[in-house]
Amino acid sequence: MSAVQRLFKRARGKSPLKQAGSLNVRMSHFSLAKNNLVHLACFMPFDKAAQMMEEIVSVQTNEETVRRLTEQVGSWMEASQIAEIEATSEPESEDEKPPERCVVSPDGAMISLVHKQWVETRTVAIGERRRSSTPKANARSMSAIFRIFRA
């Protein structure tokens, strides 16, 4: 069972149609179609994924529905990964001193997407400064944050 199928299975219990107990057969076909649609949308633009679904399994949908479903599954996956990390991570010890100095390296770039759309990516790398005899900054224990913004 794929990650997308597991997420839809978890969310299915919250559906009002499922709680009413009706349309079980249709819901299983609908869930399979949603699962396939999200998989397609991960590899191609949303409008092309909608066209492919219509050609392959005769399910009509539009670009906004594909976008909404894909982003919903993405948010479920993010929440699942965060919960998994929080469950497996060790609590921070209070004995550990914060570093005296940190190295911060911000960066950004504009990236061209399909249909002449542009997004801005922003990256910030943060690390603990390592003592060295050379004048250039050396860092260890690096962490990085990446974000995408609409231009």
Image (cartoon, grey):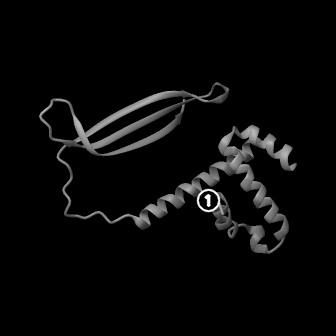
Residue 35: x %, y % from top left? 72, 55
- Mark 1: secondary structure: helix
Q: Name the foreground residue: 55 vs 104.
A: 55
Label 1, on which residue? 3
In what quadrant of the picture does the C terminus appear? top right
Q: Quadrant of residue 17?
A: bottom right
Note whether residue 59 is visible: no
Residue 133: x %, y % from top left? 12, 34
Is residue 103 shown above or below 82? above
Which residue lies most toward the left here?
133
Residue 144: x %, y % from top left? 38, 43
The answer to whether 48 appears left or right of 2 in the picture is: right
The answer to whether 141 appears left or right of 71 in the picture is: left
Q: Residue at x 59, y 57 (%)?
A: 76
Residue 120: x %, y % from top left? 50, 31
Q: Residue at x 75, y 42 (%)?
A: 49
